[in-house]
């Protein structure tokens, strides 16, 4: 059991040295790192927060001095209200540490978090700071104290009731049917609301006590209450409306609003949540969903196939206004369709078929291009193009609905992007491609070093891609050591950019391929631009600087080692952060389940990705899939799936899973899925007769058409020619795994 | 007995003074009352006391008032048209006594209704109340105008057709599946033996009025309560022959009504 919650990752520009090696007495590092409201990206409307947890990573080193770090000078809290400052957690010397800092639901003398701190968090953000640190005798004879810390995630808990599903979605006008709502947060336990803090005197009264049926066609609102015995809150996850209590309602569609009336916070507040607006997974993590529509009808027949009813195609066009970047919504169908909150113009005259398939080579699902014909009546599209509306690369969602049923019951067929359009007489023709095409057309890495950004950049670094690094990257033997090359971006301060994001650590630094640099001769910093830098105490000249390290940290995706290593999560990071595919277009749950499969295979820490040379995203994706398949779902979201070997049962007492017991081959096999245990040769038996294991003979079929199976073992690089650095040429070493 | 048609509409953005309420979605505004698209209605947020007030600027002659693609049921308590002289003054919500006051006749299953009248007034109000309606009240088109008439030479009875569009799927075994796609009325008007005088006056006036393509109001039989908001499908093609005896055919089809998802 848990409380509905949402996690915001804070890693993109979040690592700061609050206390550097060398400092003067009384030094302060003001408000760093700080997360503005924009950094937090808190959605509007999330106004029913009850408490929060902030996970952090911290490290503290000292050399040759005995006093321990004085934590009393280190604070974290909500911006800018220093009244809500908290002491940084204790960190032992010489060790990395991680943990949770609590924004409590209740503070004695202050009140509930909802009333006293939520507004400040939403309006301002979070900070860490070090104030007037004044140690006994630092910075002499090689002594130093060094403290770095960064917040990795913000987890906010909400009082909103969340409805994931309802066991039936329609009822007759007379009522009289039992309905069960399943979700979370219907009646949170006090101890879970108070985790990390003291108990609230008088407890919490956050049980759902009213359910409203809000009519969408003017039927009005009908309420039932728990107090009157109209329904029971069976648990924090279930509400039951018994058959004899379900109210009589007029014909039409309804939204269901759950209310917690006068929750005893500092002020009497109603906590409300429409069923379906948010959904949550088994961990209580909430995500935006679709509001559930309940239908009241005496003629509706609930049957799987609606024969004799022509489905209605609905298209939602998410266009963009180039003047301000705002979204411009257009709605078209084959007929004029009146819905509760929108109207579909009947301009759609034709739509090509929507076949789906998958690519033999990559295993990626592919969606055939789609063509829509729309009548340009009243110069609808001429006007659109003459204005400031952008169509190219914009999203179109296609739904199917049935006449005389709720609009809310429409089903999502597919989402695509507009690839091209043209007029053919009075028809506006729009060609669409699957949604990945929009994001896979670029090259990666996305960032390059420029003179504009780094005034004193080394000439060789101009135009070079800034490395993207995930997983454990280590090459400590051989002639060429250090798997990633750092790029000199300041010849006056001897500063090199190591990675485009915040690395978990840099473990070894090499100069000129093989010379390990003493850690005293460089410092590592994570700066406000989100990148990781290496700054040397002396000039490295034209020597190549390489390093080994541990890749990016991303809360929720990290392995037990504290950084992203699972292949599924590396691919997710690649899609989400590097390719910048919007979260709304990614099926996170599928990546989580596939990551579990990798975990079960013992490969939770096996993945890595180094992007330093130019690559096509599709190639990188293909390499990262490692036997999984990545495909666009019908709603346009990219999903990842993989066969779980544990699902294959053994047969007849055999110890190994039996996948192929009997094959009747009628032609050469053609591998459809990118199975992990890829095969390029197989013994096939033919001329099957009706006895389960009898075949006349067998032959060996072989093909060169395959994908290398995923190999978790780190191989020494043998592909790199390691030519000396020449101006205008860059050595690139990439191992997308 | 004769055929009536109405091409113009005195209701415009300038003359539509006010309505009781309009749907908050932004799609079903009062402007839809005169947008020449009956499938996109003005949708109120109420079922009772629904009104629209028109101010024509001065006392103007009105001979036709029609509501098209409304969702009123037979026996709607109030669905009436009221007129007010300029001297009487503008009504606030139509509840005031009018200089003209007449109920519409709502026919079962027929989503259009109209009144013919002969009044010269400045202010007009439609009033709608049907508390028992499952949905908030809505009207696709509100036409206030003067009408014209074909008096002679058309063939009666005209041809009136009800067309159901169907989608068809046939399986390899011959199982046929039909889906209803939509329906609309279609009319074919045959004019035979039209003489010059009528060709030049009534038919040419009609051609000019509908300008080849405008949707307009068509009342095929002024003795019945039915009216339609139609498009003209055929090219308007009339010819004066030397023998002064001319034939022509006009094909009309009801404008699409659209569908509702609840």
Image: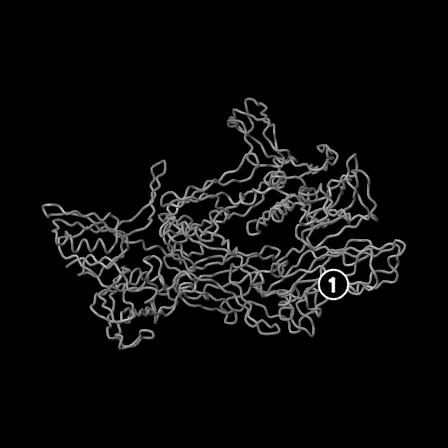
Neighbour tally class for label 1: few under 14, some 14-19, many 20 plus, Cα within 10 Å: some
Q: Residue furthest left?
A: B243
**Residue A216 on image: x %, y %:** 42, 63
**Residue A686 on image: x %, y %:** 54, 25
Answer above or below: position of A104 versus A444.
below
- Nearer-the-camera pick, A421 or B167: A421
- On the question of residue A620 being in view, the answer is yes
- Nearer-the-camera pick, A485 or A537: A537
Kindly identify the residue that appears in the image at 62 percent across and 71 percent down: A115
Label 1 sits on residue: A30
Which quadrant would residue A141 be assigned to in this image? bottom right
- Residue A485 shown left or right of residue A247 in the figure: right
* Model colouring: one colour
Q: Where is the N terminus of chain A found, in terms of image quarters? A: bottom right
**Residue A204 on image: x %, y %:** 62, 70
Q: Where is the C terminus of chain A found, in terms of image quarters? A: top right
Q: Look at the numbered disc 1 and give the secondary structure of its residue.
A: loop
Chain letter of the residue carrying label 1: A
Answer above or below: position of A651 versus B1.
above
- Nearer-the-camera pick, B242 or A426: B242
- On the question of residue A648 being in view, the answer is no
Answer above or below: position of A436 versus A133.
above
**Residue A724 on image: x %, y %:** 75, 34
- Residue B187 shown left or right of residue A535 in the figure: left
- Residue A699 shown left or right of residue A712 in the figure: left
Image mark count: 1
- Residue A668 shown left or right of residue A732 in the figure: left
């Amino acid at each position: 059991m848990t409380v509905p919650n949402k996690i915001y990752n804070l890693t993109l520009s979040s690592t700061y040295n609050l206390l550097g090696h060398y400092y003067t007495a009384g030094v302060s590092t003001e408000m760093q790192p700080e997360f503005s409201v924009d950094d937090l990206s808190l959605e509007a409307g999330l106004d029913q927060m009850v408490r929060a947890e902030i996970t952090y990573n911290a490290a503290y080193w000292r050399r040759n001095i005995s006093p321990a770090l004085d934590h009393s000078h280190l604070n974290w809290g909500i911006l800018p209200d220093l009244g809500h400052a908290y002491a940084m957690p204790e960190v032992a010397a010489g060790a990395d540490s991680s943990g949770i800092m609590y924004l409590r639901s209740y503070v004695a003398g202050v009140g509930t978090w909802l009333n006293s701190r939520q507004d400040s968090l939403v309006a301002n953000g979070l900070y860490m700071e070090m104030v007037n640190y004044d140690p006994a005798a630092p910075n002499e004879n090689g002594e130093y104290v060094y403290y770095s810390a960064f917040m990795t995630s913000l987890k906010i808990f909400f009082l909103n009731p969340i409805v994931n599903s309802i066991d039936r979605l329609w009822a007759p006008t007379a009522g009289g049917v039992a309905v069960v709502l399943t979700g979370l947060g219907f009646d949170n336990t006090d101890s879970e609301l108070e985790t990390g803090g003291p108990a609230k005197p008088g407890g919490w009264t956050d049980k759902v006590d009213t359910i409203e049926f809000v009519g969408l066609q003017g039927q009005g609102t009908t309420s039932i209450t728990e107090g009157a015995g109209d329904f029971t809150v069976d648990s924090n996850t279930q509400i039951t409306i018994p058959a004899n209590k379900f109210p009589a309602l007029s014909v039409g569609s309804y939204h269901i609003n759950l209310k917690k009336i006068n929750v005893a916070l500092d002020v009497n507040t109603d906590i409300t949540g429409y069923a379906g607006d948010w959904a949550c997974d088994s961990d209580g993590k909430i995500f935006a969903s679709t509001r559930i529509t309940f239908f009241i009808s005496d003629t509706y027949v609930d049957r799987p196939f609606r024969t004799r009813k022509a489905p209605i195609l609905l298209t939602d066009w998410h266009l963009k206004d180039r003047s301000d970047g705002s979204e411009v919504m257009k709605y078209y169908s084959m007929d004029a369709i009146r819905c509760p909150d929108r109207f579909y113009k009947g301009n759609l005259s034709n739509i090509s078929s929507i076949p789906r398939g998958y690519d033999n080579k990559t295993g990626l699902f592919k969606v055939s291009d789609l063509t829509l014909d729309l009548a340009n009546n009243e110069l609808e599209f001429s006007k659109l193009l003459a204005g400031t509306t952008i169509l190219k690369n914009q999203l179109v969602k296609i739904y199917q609905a049935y006449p005389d049923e709720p609009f809310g019951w429409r089903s999502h067929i597919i989402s695509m992007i507009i690839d091209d359009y043209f007029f053919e007489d009075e028809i506006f023709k729009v060609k669409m491609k699957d949604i990945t095409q929009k994001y896979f057309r670029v090259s990666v890495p996305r960032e390059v070093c420029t003179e504009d950004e780094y005034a004193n950049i080394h000439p060789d670094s101009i135009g070079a891609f800034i490395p993207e690094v995930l997983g454990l990257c280590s090459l400590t033997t051989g002639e060429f050591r250090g798997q990633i090359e750092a790029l000199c971006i300041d010849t006056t301060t001897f500063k090199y950019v190591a990675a485009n994001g915040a690395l978990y650590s840099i473990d070894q630094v090499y100069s000129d391929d093989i010379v390990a640099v003493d850690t005293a001769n460089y410092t590592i910093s994570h700066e406000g631009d989100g990148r990781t830098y290496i700054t040397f105490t002396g000039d490295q000249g034209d020597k190549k600087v390489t390093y080994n390290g541990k890749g990016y940290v991303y809360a929720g995706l990290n392995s037990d080692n504290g950084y992203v290593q699972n292949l599924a999560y590396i691919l997710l990071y690649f899609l989400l952060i590097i390719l910048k595919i919007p979260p709304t277009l990614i099926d996170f749950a599928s990546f989580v389940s596939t990551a579990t499969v990798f975990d079960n295979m013992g490969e939770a820490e096996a993945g890595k990705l180094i992007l330093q040379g130019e690559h096509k995203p599709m190639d990188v994706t293909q390499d990262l899939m490692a036997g999984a398949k990545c495909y666009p779902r019908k709603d346009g979201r990219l999903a990842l799936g993989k066969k779980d070997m544990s699902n294959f049962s053994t047969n007849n007492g055999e110890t190994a899973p039996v996948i192929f017991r009997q094959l009747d081959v009628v032609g050469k096999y053609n591998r459809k899925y990118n199975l992990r245990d890829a095969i390029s040769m197989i013994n096939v038996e033919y001329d099957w007769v009706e006895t389960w294991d009898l075949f006349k003979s067998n032959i060996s079929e072989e093909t060169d058409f395959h994908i290398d199976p995923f190999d978790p073992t780190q191989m020494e690089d043998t592909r790199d020619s390691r030519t000396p650095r020449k101006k205008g040429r860059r050595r690139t070493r990439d191992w997308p795994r | 007995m004769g055929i009536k048609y109405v091409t113009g509409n005195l209701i415009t953005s300038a003359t539509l003074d006010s309505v009781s309420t309009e749907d908050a979605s932004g799609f079903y505004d009062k402007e839809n009352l005169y947008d020449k698209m009956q499938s996109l209605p003005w949708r109120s947020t109420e079922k009772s006391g629904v009104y629209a007030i028109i101010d024509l600027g001065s006392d103007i002659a009105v001979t036709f008032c029609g509501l098209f693609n409304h969702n009123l049921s037979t026996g709607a308590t109030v669905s009436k048209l009221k007129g007010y002289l300029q001297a009487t003054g503008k009504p606030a919500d139509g509840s005031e006594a009018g200089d003209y006051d007449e109920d519409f006749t709502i026919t079962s299953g027929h989503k259009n209704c109209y009144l013919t009248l002969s009044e010269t007034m400045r202010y007009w109000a439609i009033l709608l109340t049907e508390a028992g309606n499952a949905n908030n009240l809505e009207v696709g088109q509100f036409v206030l105008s003067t009408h014209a008439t074909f008096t002679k030479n058309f063939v009666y009875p005209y041809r009136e057709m009800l067309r159901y569009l169907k989608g068809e799927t046939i399986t390899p075994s011959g199982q046929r599946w039909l889906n209803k796609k939509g329906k609309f009325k279609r009319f074919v008007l045959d004019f035979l033996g039209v003489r010059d005088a009528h060709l030049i006056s009534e038919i040419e006036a009609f051609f000019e009025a509908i300008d080849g393509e405008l949707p307009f109001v068509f009342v095929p039989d002024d003795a019945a309560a039915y009216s339609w908001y139609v498009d003209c499908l055929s090219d308007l093609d009339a010819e004066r022959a030397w023998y002064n005896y001319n034939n022509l055919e006009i094909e009309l089809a009801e404008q699409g009504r659209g569908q509702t998802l609840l």
